[in-house]
Amino acid sequence: MDPITHGMVGLAIASISGEPIIGAVSIGATLGAMSPDLDIVMQCKGHLSYLKNHRGMSHSIPFLVGISMIISMILSFIFPGTTFLKILLWTFLGTLSHSLLDILNSYGAQIFWPLSKKRYSGSLLLVYDPVVIILSLYMLISNEPNNILSMKAGLIFFVYLYIRMIARNIICDKIIHRLGGEIHIKKVKLLPSMTRIHKWHFIVEAKEKFIVGEVNIFNRQFQVLKELEKREIPIYEEIVRSTVGEFFNNFTPMYHIDIQDKGDYYYVRFTDLRYIIKDDFLYHATAVVSKELETLEGVFHPYSLNQSVIIT
């Protein structure tokens, strides 16, 4: 989610603390809720470095605890009337809200780093989720008692998540029913649309090909956007273990590989199947591999094939 939404959620959490809306607790929770996105500083080392580290260490529990303590120490000095432990509690809740919300969308986060580098993802919330934003605003403007407000907001949020889970399961069953008679389905991955609450993107991996499309839950319109054939590739394992292959395998769990034999070398195209905008995928990588299976060139293409970042 974007930093503004995270900040709103942090401020909404602080609103049930009983502390002033402009005070150490609210400032701490708001800053805490935005702080995991400090990994943006990795852009100083280039876009590739940022994407490798985004939602990694900065979204882990050790970082959340550490940054919460730093923010709380500064605020307790500025606001001596509020105890350090109270500021720390609400600041940590703010930081934790950030990682939990990021886990609930399709990109996920490495919350258990360094014990595990697995990126956990619930694939339920949008990048810009209108329900989360509206619920946060409701908490900020409501005059209800804090205990009632917190229970009501929590209930609404969990009901919303439950509805999203039920909708996802129903759509998954419909996809299997519709396509299962035509292809040998191995896996179905459903992802929330980046900005449209009524749409879900799907990735179907079959024995023969990948099918990428979207479903409109209001009119039940089922649209196939792309079909990518899967071919027998004798050097597939070697390509996956290459520098570019390892990078892309760590970057996304769902990708397609196309290899073209150019005579003196192989030209390899990796495609991240998770995000598609205007009939094209958001992330690609290309590699030039020698006949001896040595990677001669590796390039990552963020957002467009016209943008290139060297993979080393």
Image (tube, rainbow, N blue to C red):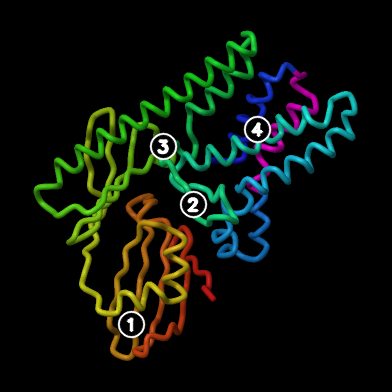
Q: Farthest front residue?
A: 115
- Main secondary-structure element of the magenta-colored stretch: helix
| Disc with the residue nearer the chain's start (1 vs 4) | 4
Comes first in the chain, label 4 or label 2:
4
Mark with earlier residue (2, 3) = 2
Q: CA distance from mark 3 to mark 4?
A: 21 Å
| Marks 3, 4: nearer the viewer | 4
Image quarter in which the C terminus is found: bottom right
Q: Of the residues under marks 3 and 1, which one precedes in the sequence?
A: 3
Q: Judge whether 282 appears above or below 45 on screen.
A: above
Left or right: residue 112 versus residue 268 is: right
Distance (Cα) linking label 4 and label 2: 21 Å
Classify residue 174 as left or right of residue 265.
Answer: left
Label 1: which residue?
266
The crowding category of the residue bearing disc 3, from other C-alpha atoms within 10 Å (few below 14, some 14 to 19, many at least 20), is many
Q: Which mark is residue 119?
A: 2
Label 2, secondary structure: give it. Answer: loop
Nearer to us: label 1 or label 4: 4
Disc 1 to disc 2, C-alpha distance: 31 Å
If you read the primary sequence from the N terminus, does the residue marked by circle 1 or circle 2 appear first? 2
Q: Amino acid at mark 1?
A: Tyr
Q: Which residue is mark 3?
A: 124
Q: Which mark is residue 93?
A: 4
**Residue 196: % across, % down:** 40, 35
**Which label number is shown at residue 91?**
none
Comparing 27 with 278, the one in front is 27
Q: Quadrant of the N terminus?
A: top right
Task: Name the N-terminal-most of marks 3 and 4.
Answer: 4
Inter-mark Cα distance, 3 to 1: 38 Å
